Amino acid sequence: MCLKVGENRDEFDTLVIHLNNMLDQLEKSESKLKSLTVDIAHDLRTPMGRIKLRIEDLLNSGNFLPENEQQLEGIQQDFSLLLDTFSGMM
């Protein structure tokens, strides 16, 4: 978005020039923030996906104490909610 600068080059035109510069800087900052968010999301999804698979493997293997099964299932449910929330944010 860019505001038009008049031909008079008075104080209002100077103000418009400064506002345009500020708008340009805001657009660049927003673009950098979006890029950073996408990079962070990508970097976090991979380990989160691995953790989810490891929990599922452990539950399917039965290599744990029976009294821990309920806790593992709770961890799996909580982690699934975390992944859903994270995906919704992105």
Image (tube, rainbow, N blue to C red):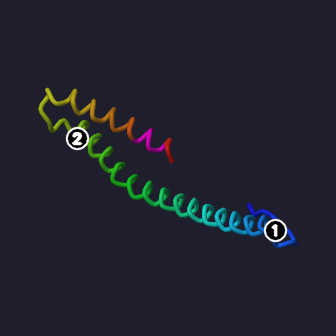
Picture coordinates of residue 69 (x, y %)?
A: 20, 29
Q: Amino acid at mark 1?
A: Val
Q: Residues within 10 Å of mark 2 (few under 14, many from 20)?
A: few
Give the residues drawn in magenta, as a range: 83-87
Residue at 29%, 40% (x, y): give it.
56
Which residue is drawn at the image coordinates 54% and 58% (left, top)? Answer: 34
Q: Position of residue 65 (x, y in %)?
A: 12, 32
Q: Secondary structure at mark 1?
A: loop
Question: Residue at the spot x=81%, y=68% of the render?
Answer: 5
Residue type, label 2: Leu
For residue 87, side relative to residue 5 (left or right): left
Q: Is residue 42 left or right of residue 68?
A: right
The answer to which of 26 and 60 lies nearer the viewer is 26
Residue bearing mark 2 = 58
Q: Is 61 placed left or right of 44 in the picture? A: left
Rounded to the nearest angstrom, the CA distance separating label 2 from label 1 is 66 Å
SS class, disc 2: helix
Which residue occupies the extreme front position in the image?
11
- Comparing 56 with 72, the one in front is 72
- The spot of residue 85 in percent (x, y) is 44, 39
**Up-down relation of residue 50 to residue 88 (above or below):** below
Tag on residue 5?
1
Q: Is residue 42 left or right of residue 29?
A: left
Out of 55 and 39, give the one closest to the viewer: 39
